[in-house]
Image (cartoon, rainbow, N blue to C red):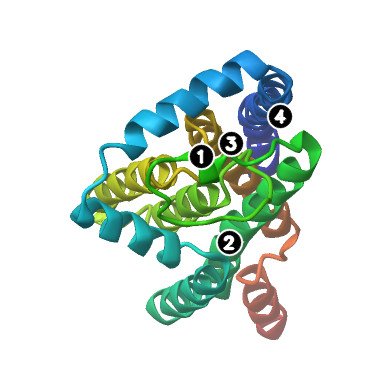
Amino acid sequence: MSAAIRQLRQFTDVALPALGTILAVITVGMLMKSSAGWTSMEMGILRRVNLMHTPQLDGVARGIDWLFSPPVAVVLVLIATGSILLATRKPRVAIQFVLIVMMPTFGAAVIKLLVQRPRPDIASLPHILVLEPGGLSFPSGHTSFAACFLLGLIVVAARQRWRPLLIIAAVVVALATAASRVYLGVHYPSDVVASIVYGTSAVTLVNVFWSLVMAHLNERRPDVQAVPAYRGEADAD
């Protein structure tokens, strides 16, 4: 069985469930947007969380808000891509990382437009830490980007001995990012949960598609070792 056929089977076995999960996330988002009772319940959670604020947690949450904001996120991707290229000397690996991070990130923005869920009523919170005027809430862009960025690093570090430590750190950072969005009151809890589920599924989908394309290109590549052997036999004749 050729590598391309194996990758095609993997694509159907992995990609279809991932795609189904993404569609389920969109459907759930639309249902929650239409449910006033659900939104009211989540708003109550935000108010209770907001009352637990401390100066230390405020600083951490604001720091995460800055770190994964769109302008800084672009810089993070550029730095990580350059570092991967320097470390591996393989442009394909760097391209794979960029696609894994950026395609799902753009996808999250598309889902925001599809679902059209308004942000929480931040002005009604007891302690306003970050004022996000208007905008859309589902899913959380900060959380989606953080999840995709960290998963991208995990994917390209597949053969590194320190990968388990990276996985642990990634889980901690992703969960901290999700919690910080709720703590700041700029996203409902369901927004950040959906972001992690979506990000994981989207990264899986992009990565398996990339593997399929690479397998196809490798099969089409000529056997470079056969050319010198052929020429050598011709010279001998």
Which numbered mark, 4 or 3, is in the foreground of this view?
4
Residue pointed to by mark 2: 96
Residue contact between numbered discs 3 and 2, judged by CB atoms under 8 Å: no
Residue pointed to by mark 3: 198
Question: N-terminal of the two: label 4 or label 2?
Answer: 4
When asked about the image quadrant of residue 137, the answer is top right
Answer left or right for 64 relative to 116: left
Please, what secondary structure does the residue beneath circle 4 have?
helix
Crowding near pointer 4: few (<14 within 10 Å), some, many (20+)? many
Give the amino acid at mark 3: Tyr
Give the Cα distance between marks 2 and 1.
Answer: 43 Å
Give the Cα distance between marks 4 and 2.
Answer: 25 Å
Residue pointed to by mark 4: 26
* Foreground pick, 73 / 35: 35
Please, what secondary structure does the residue beneath circle 1 have?
helix
Q: Residue at x 64, y 24 (%)?
A: 17
Please, what secondary structure does the residue beneath circle 3 have?
helix
Please, what secondary structure does the residue beneath circle 2 have?
helix
Residue pointed to by mark 1: 124
Crowding near pointer 2: few (<14 within 10 Å), some, many (20+)? some
Q: Residue at x 70, y 35 (%)?
A: 117
When asked about the image quadrant of residue 228, the answer is bottom right
Image x and y of residue 52, in percent? 25, 38
Give the amino acid at mark 1: Ser
